Image (cartoon, helix red, strand yellow):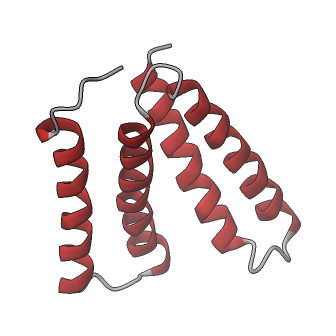
Amino acid sequence: MTPIITLLIAIFTEVIGTSALKYSEGVTKPVPSVVFVIAYALSFYFLSLALKDMQIGMAYAIWSGVGLVLTVIVGIILWREPLDWARVVGVFLILAGIFFINVVSKTPAH
């Protein structure tokens, strides 16, 4: 499996874990709590696989940034969280940071 595929799996399982954490209501509901633990374990496992072939700064920036964006989208869809200008600007700045780390930075990949 390529590093980017393992990183994408890590991202999606992290978003699933975060969503399950919300549903667990403070880890008081058993099923969402178990899903949360398993999803986070899988996320860190796949992140560790991606780190074998990726720089930690790049992998973590992508993992956390894309995970954040997807989690914001999930929050808007599932919990009807508001999308105000501050949230839009904040997400844009995070994505811009990911872009600069991965595209503009002159640090050679491993």
> At x 44% / y 63%, what residue is drawn?
71
Q: Nearer the viewer, residue 34 or 42?
A: 42
- Horizontal side, residue 77 vs residue 22: left or right: left
> At x 17% / y 56%, what residue is drawn?
96
Q: Nearer the viewer, residue 62 or 82?
A: 62
> At x 41% / y 61%, what residue is drawn?
68
- Horizontal side, residue 31 vs residue 13: left or right: right
Note whether 5 is above or below 62 in the view shown: above
- Horizontal side, residue 80 vs residue 10: left or right: left
Q: Quadrant of the C terminus?
A: top left
Note whether 54 is above or below 81 in the view shown: above
Q: Residue 30 location, x and y as percent?
A: 88, 65
Q: Nearer the viewer, residue 20 or 10?
A: 10
Q: Quadrant of residue 33?
A: bottom right
Q: Residue 49 location, x and y as percent?
A: 58, 25
Note whether 8 is above or below 94 in the view shown: above
> At x 27% / y 79%, what residue is drawn?
87
- Horizontal side, residue 40 vs residue 93: left or right: right
Q: Residue 89 location, x and y as percent?
A: 18, 75
Q: Residue 5 location, x and y as percent?
A: 44, 24
